[in-house]
Image (tube, coloured by chain):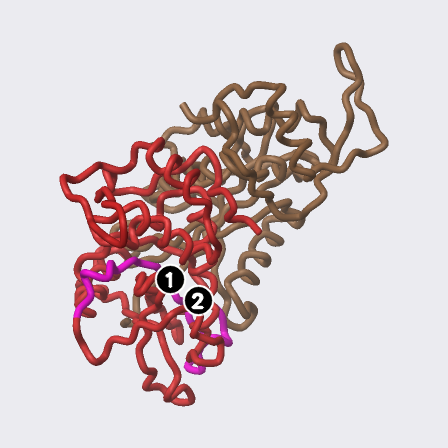
Chain colours: A red, B brown
Amino acid sequence: MSKSNLQVSLEIVLFSLIAEKLHVYVQNCATAPYIDKYCLPHGDILFTEDNTIEEAIMRTLKALQFKSLSYIEQVKTIGGIARDPRGWSLAVVYYGFVAVDKMIDSTNIQWIAIDDLQANDFAFDHALIVQESHQRLKSKALYTSLPAFLLPEEFTLTDLQKAYEAVLDCKIEKKSFRRRMLDAHILAETEKVRRANHRPAQVYQLIDQTPHIFNRIIEGARH
Amino acid sequence: MSKSNLQVSLEIVLFSLIAEKLHVYVQNCATAPYIDKYCLPHGDILFTEDNTIEEAIMRTLKALQFKSLSYIEQVKTIGGIARDPRGWSLAVVYYGFVAVDKMIDSTNIQWIAIDDLQANDFAFDHALIVQESHQRLKSKALYTSLPAFLLPEEFTLTDLQKAYEAVLDCKIEKKSFRRRMLDAHILAETEKVRRANHRPAQVYQLIDQTPHIFNRIIEGARH
């Protein structure tokens, strides 16, 4: 292709679970005509520094002070003439998870519940990027342990169920959920017990660093 | 990013099912040092013709004389300094399915069984692109009706089972497979019956134009 006018950016949808709700990290857009709109954190590929796209992503996250994501995945690449007023552009989109205990304290950081975000809050096509990333996350949550990666390193089965419920936006039956998670051998018991309202709850960690694929989709999760 | 030196290409992995085996479409590479190696069909984005990446893909497929794919999906974007001797490059990878009855007759076309291809048969990083596309297809075949889209419009349950077996590279238990496919209400009976060795087999068509997600993964498919 003609090399002039092509913009390539990396767009990152950061998800976190705050107060049992799925949140997205947004910045304030400084580009007209989108002043006062939200935009996603983004980065560029630097030929002299990055050997691969993944290196560019890691450098971008480090610059944003997100050093320890529990999960990151490329979602898709979108591109076209209409998505950026400056010309034909490509955006390589990733989503990543930031556990609530790994959040950094900065006034530039805005975590907004995904249910509170509307399409016209966003600059460019970032509403579409968030929507497609959320849809991918929901699809994968149906049959993998992906929502577990939204949690801090140590969590109870109730925490885990609430993570699934937040991602899938539905109630899940407790007994079959617990049986499924324990039968999959993806959780390691820690020596800790957490005392909440009534009975003590076992604290777990994930065994594997990659999501597990279940034999059946999460029950009750498909409407 | 600096705009100079960035190559962006579209790379297309075309899959087909020929003689009950998964095949990939390859071309002969004309670029040194890869003469005599295979490469994937590829295209460019043309700023003046293509409004989106999808339009560029459709134009590329048309130029290759593949007008009627039964399925197409973006796999991922890979990019780096080392993947092309000409400089930093991005490849946006798609895979698509060509049903055997829609194949065009041309001496430039080479369909090779995926089991007969080895990594060093390929130019550039195209072996890796094929491998990752194949892996994505296998993953999706575990819990969706995607392999059905490899078949011609009309097929029997035996054809469908063989498509799954070719993609997943394993034997599937006939009775539970048939029950699963019929219970999912994704197939419409045609008025045709095909007579093979012994008993007549009902001929079906797909009802939906998008893959169906099953409640359970295909039994016997995980080793």
Q: The disc labelled 1 sits on which kind of residue?
A: Val
To which quarter of the image does residue B80 belong? bottom left
The residue type indicated by label 2 comes to Ile
In what element is the residue under mark 1? strand
Chain identifier of the residue bearing label 2 in the image: A
* Furthest residue toward left: A191
Q: Residues within 10 Å of mark 2 (few under 14, many from 20)?
A: many
Extreme residue toward the right, this view: B191
Q: Nearer the viewer, residue A100 or B219?
A: A100
Q: Nearer the viewer, residue A99 or B58?
A: A99
At 59% from the left and 49% from the top, the residue drawn is B64
Relative horizontal placement of residue B200, taking residue A141 as reference (left or right): right
The nearer-to-camera label among 1 and 2 is 2
For the C terminus of chain B, give its image quadrant. Answer: top left
The alpha-carbon separation of the residues under discs 1 and 2 comes to 8 Å
Q: Secondary structure at mark 2?
A: helix
Looking at marks 1 and 2 on the same chain, the residue that comes earlier in the sequence is marked by 1
- According to the picture, the residue beneath numbered tag 2 turns out to be A129
Residue A93 - label? 1
Residue B211 is situated, as x and y percent measured from the top left of the image, at 60, 44
Give coordinates of residue B19: x percent, y percent. 61, 23
Query: Which range is magenta?
Result: A80-104
Image coordinates of residue A35 in percent, x first then y, are 37, 89
User: Residue A92 colored magenta?
Assistant: yes
Is residue B24 found left or right of B193 in the rendered image? left
